[in-house]
Amino acid sequence: MLSRDKSPIELDWSEVWGGFKQLLPISLFVVVFGVAFGLAAAQTGLDDGASLLMSTLVFAGASQFAALDLWGAQVPVVPLIVTVFAINARHLLMGATLYPWLRELPRAKRYGVMMVISDANWAMSMQAFNSGKSGVGLILGGGIALWAAWVLGSWLGVYFGSEIQDPVSLGLDMVMGCFLLAMVVGGQKNLRMLIIWSVAAVSSLLAYRYLPENSHVVVGALAGGLLGAVWMEKKHEH
């Protein structure tokens, strides 16, 4: 069994291909999420090229939706930066948890692999690492599958965005909410996570009611993230 002191440093391309195929079924759902983003971007008035460039280079669904919420004739740069950072702050923890296994990779390969990290391929790679297997292929191959699905979905949403005048009537405005709800339901189920999600939700609702517009995204993310960082999950020794 691989330990945290012995990193699976080989980047085998057959393993990458295997990770790509393993994450492909999940990628179908990412396409739908990408369509919702492309459609929302078109309805917001964001340039088609800018929308596709954002999905290609940023590859961060929730923060891209948040950016659209702040988009307008005058973009509030500081709130935009704070919002995106707060939503994506979990990637700092993802990187920290993967470092014991990836640290012996050459720096260029290590950061190249992390360019396509997301919730799904991170979770599956951690399962592989913790069971003594190499999860590098899942990170890179699975990440490429998810990224390609996100870009494809965004393009479809942008392309057909002008044809759909009322996305609310089709329920497409609920795709992001359903996606995030599925992440919550499918995650860990214990008292700690229940309290963290509750604190984030209540903080966001209070901010929505009493603080400036769009601040609820930042407040909710920070409240839940800070509580999760302070209240660390106990590690069981085997």
Image: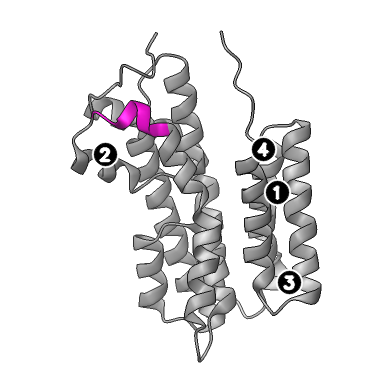
Q: Is residue 150 above or below residue 74?
A: above
Residue position for label 4: 231
Classify residue 98 by image quadrant.
top left
Cα gap from disc 2 to disc 1, whole angstroms = 31 Å
Name the spot of residue 225 as percent of width and height, x first: 62, 49
- Marks 2 & 1, CB-CB < 8 Å contact: no
The residue to which callout 3 is attached is: 169
Q: Of circles 3 and 2, which is in front?
A: 2
The stretch in magenta equals 98-104
Which marked residue is nearer to the observer: mark 2 or mark 4?
4
At label 2, the amino acid type is: Arg
Dot 1 or dot 3: first in sequence order is 3
Given the image, on which type of amino acid does mark 4 rest?
Answer: Trp
Task: Please name whichever residue, 147 or 153, is drawn nearer the observer in this view of the structure.
Answer: 147
The residue wearing badge 2 is: 110
Pair 1/3: label in front? 1
Position of residue 42 measured from the top left corner of the image (x, y, whole percent): 51, 78
What is the CA distance from the residue labelled 3 to the residue labelled 2?
44 Å
92 on left or right of 184:
left
